Amino acid sequence: MNLIKSIHFTRIVIRRYLRRHRQRSSEGAAMNSQCLPLIPDRAPSPAMIAVAGLSVLALAMGIGRFAFTALLPLAKEQGLLTLSSAGWLAASNYGGYLVGALWVVRSRSAHAARRLGIGLVFSVVTTLAMGWELGSAGWMAVRFVAGVASAWVYIYATGIMLRALVHAHASGWSALHYPGVGAGIVFSACVAQFLLNRGAATAWGWWTLGGFAALVALPAAAVLIRAELSITATHSAPTSAAHGVTVHPPLGWMAAAYGLAGFGYIVNATFLPTLLRTQPGVADAALTGWLVVGLATLPATALWIRLGLWIGAYPALIACTLLEAAGVALPVLWPGQHLTALAGAALLGGTFMGIAGLAQWLVRVPDPQATSRRIGFVTACYGIGQIAGPLATSGLAQGNDLTVPVLLAAGALVLSAGLFEVSRRVERLV
């Protein structure tokens, strides 16, 4: 009951905040119509916006989504999950992510600030809920809702952050946004290692991470919501009606390549600690490998986007995808070796968000509403690949041996690189 009351209270706070700001905006518009100067609410600084963006990605993606990977070996050893049931739980989460992305695609007049607030609330609640014994069906439902929340937070927070920083003429601060995923992975890996060393119950991991998320979510959301409402109070949405219907370049090959990239990375992104835990010689480095993934993720997107500006977005995207294929395959091509295990982890962490950043940069268009829908569309294709990955693992794994699904994932990434090259030649998104 306390949990339900907390959710209800948070929704009331967000609703009252939005209503109060709309009233201020209406009063400001009325004053402006009387030729009085419009004085908008003071927007947050670019640094605050970037840090808030980092925080919400850490909560909804690094924790809400990828904490499952860090805690999976512990849950498996305590008899809570098997490799097959873990695959179904992961697929349920990625199914929710797909639904959330498609929801964005279909929402042509969504209130971004409200959707962001709702997504963060449910991300926190579902993280806490995983600590209770809900049974397979209950856990699948919770992970599905967590996936929807992750998609909403990722897409709407990214859109708000980019618009606010462009409005402030401070786009360079966006480099702080994407490392939030890595920051959440690092934190969840440290919590999982701490619990593993002490033989604690998996539930404590979920409750610790969910409690931390709850503490950080409210101030971070307040900054982004304030930034979004400050922009809408001073600028009307751009429209292309005066210039006729704008035709944007197609995305078919790009979407197919991005979907394969989702399949290619998600097998190791879900099962890497479990994979290393079953290999003699590197079992003690299982969570260290996942920590390396998180650390490598921190600077990755900024570095790959910088490289894309230097050599071109498509060449950088193709190189990033091929490096990820090598990183995915290394732990099973040379099993039981610390060097290859950690090198594979570093390559995985150093590339998967780079692929996301470069692909989303390529699909953008001047119209912000169209950009959100295009990002939502390719994210949905990515989500289909992510659902297929855990299901393929459940079906193709031989006991605890993940060699076949891991090599299949690496092959999918090689094919993805080929389709990115087709997109470069045919669609020419730059």
Image (spheres, rainbow, N blue to C red):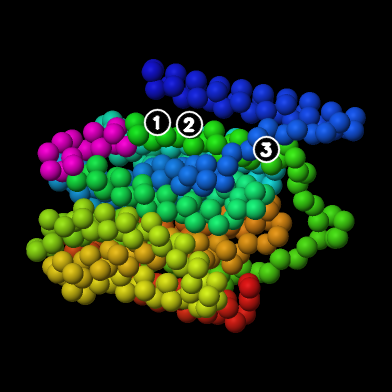
**Callout 3 environment at 10 Å: few (<14), some (14 to 19), or many (20+)?**
some
Asked whether the residues under the numbered discs 1 and 3 touch, taking CB atoms below 8 Å apart as contact, a structural biologist would say no
First in sequence: mark 3 or mark 2?
2
Q: Is residue 63 left or right of residue 402?
A: right
Frontmost residue, 226 versus 48: 48
Using the numbered discs, state the Cα–Cα distance from disc 1 to disc 2 in whole angstroms: 7 Å
Q: Is residue 130 left or right of residue 375?
A: left
User: Residue placed at 53% from the left, 75% from the top?
Assistant: 310
Amino acid at dot 3: Ser
Q: Main secondary structure of the magenta part?
A: helix
Frontmost residue, 313 versus 371: 313
Using the numbered discs, state the Cα–Cα distance from disc 3 to disc 2 in whole angstroms: 18 Å
Q: Quadrant of residue 18?
A: top right
The residue at the far bottom in this view is 425
Asked whether the residues under the numbered discs 3 and 2 touch, taking CB atoms below 8 Å apart as contact, a structural biologist would say no
Q: Which residue is mark 2?
A: 218
Amino acid at dot 1: Leu
Using the numbered discs, state the Cα–Cα distance from disc 1 to disc 3 in whole angstroms: 24 Å
The residue at the far right in this view is 34
First in sequence: mark 1 or mark 3?
1
Asked whether the residues under the numbered discs 1 and 2 touch, taking CB atoms below 8 Å apart as contact, a structural biologist would say yes
**Callout 2 environment at 10 Å: few (<14), some (14 to 19), or many (20+)?**
some
Q: Which residue is mark 3?
A: 230
Q: Which residue is mark 1?
A: 215
Frontmost residue, 167 versus 427: 167
Q: Position of residue 168 (x, y in %)?
A: 65, 48
User: Residue placed at 69% from the left, 47% from the top?
Assistant: 108
User: Residue placed at 90% from the left, 33% from the top?
Assistant: 35
Q: Position of residue 325 (x, y in %)?
A: 35, 72
Q: Which residues are magenta?
A: 194-209
For residue 366, above or below residue 77: below
Report the disc number at residue 416: none
